Structure formats: structure tokens, C-alpha cells
């Protein structure tokens, strides 16, 4: 499982943003995902696996455009983990 990677994602607001993923070293697997918003502010969310085995945001109070990227962030994590074998 890859621990750090970046991916460009086109968000539903039409902007392409670079998301940085960093896996945490805990008993459970989590990724901290960071991105710069249109105002230059760094936003960070935590992605974890839910009871159904799906990657979900654990963070609250994020802008709607970021919340709507959840499926794309989950896909990016799954793709990188599949490549790693």
C-alpha cells in the first residue's frame, strides 16, 4: 500500500486541483488528504474505511465542492493501492 502520492482531480466547480495523499501509521489505515482552495487556504480531510469497506471522509465542516470529491478521492486511493499490489 503506497504511503504518499498526489493526483490532479477536476472538481465539480470546474477547477483542477492537486490533491496530496499521506497514509498515517496507525493500527487502522487512514489517509490525510490536503488541497489548496481557490483562496489559497490549505484544507485537509481524513479518509478512512467504513463498515462497508468504502473510503469515506472522516472530517466535518468542509466546503461542499470538497465533500463532493469524496468518490474521486476514494477511487484515487483504490487505484494506487491496486497498483502497489
Image (cartoon, rainbow, N blue to C red):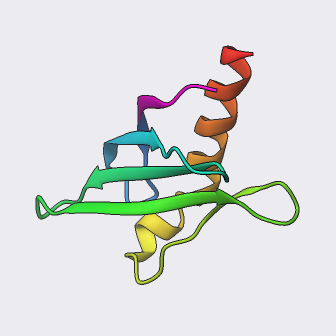
- Above-or-below relation of 9 to 32: above
Asked if residue 22 is among those painted magenta in the image, a careful observer would answer: no
Q: What residue is rendered at 85% in x and 66% in y? A: 51
61 with respect to 25 (left or right): left
Q: Which one is nearer the viewer's eye here, 13 or 44?
A: 44
> Percent x, y for residue 61?
41, 83
13 with respect to 48 (left or right): left
Q: What residue is rendered at 78% in x and 55% in y? A: 54
Q: What residue is rendered at 49% in x and 73% in y? A: 59
28 with respect to 5 (left or right): right
Image-quadrant location for residue 1: top right
Q: From which residue to which does the magenta span run?
A: 1-7
Image-quadrant location for residue 41: bottom left
Number of disc labels: 0
Q: Which one is nearer the viewer's eye here, 14 or 25?
A: 25
26 with respect to 85 (left or right): left
> Percent x, y for residue 74?
64, 48
Q: What residue is rendered at 43% in x and 44% in y? A: 10
Amino acid at each position: 500500500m503506497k504511503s504518499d502520492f498526489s493526483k490532479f482531480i477536476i472538481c465539480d466547480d470546474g477547477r483542477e486541483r492537486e490533491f496530496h495523499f499521506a497514509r498515517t501509521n496507525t493500527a487502522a489505515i487512514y489517509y490525510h488528504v490536503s488541497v489548496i482552495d481557490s483562496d489559497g487556504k490549505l484544507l485537509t480531510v481524513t479518509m478512512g474505511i467504513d463498515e462497508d469497506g468504502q473510503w469515506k471522509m472522516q472530517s466535518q465542516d468542509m466546503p461542499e465542492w470538497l465533500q463532493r470529491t469524496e468518490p474521486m478521492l476514494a477511487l484515487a486511493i483504490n487505484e494506487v493501492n491496486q497498483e502497489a499490489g
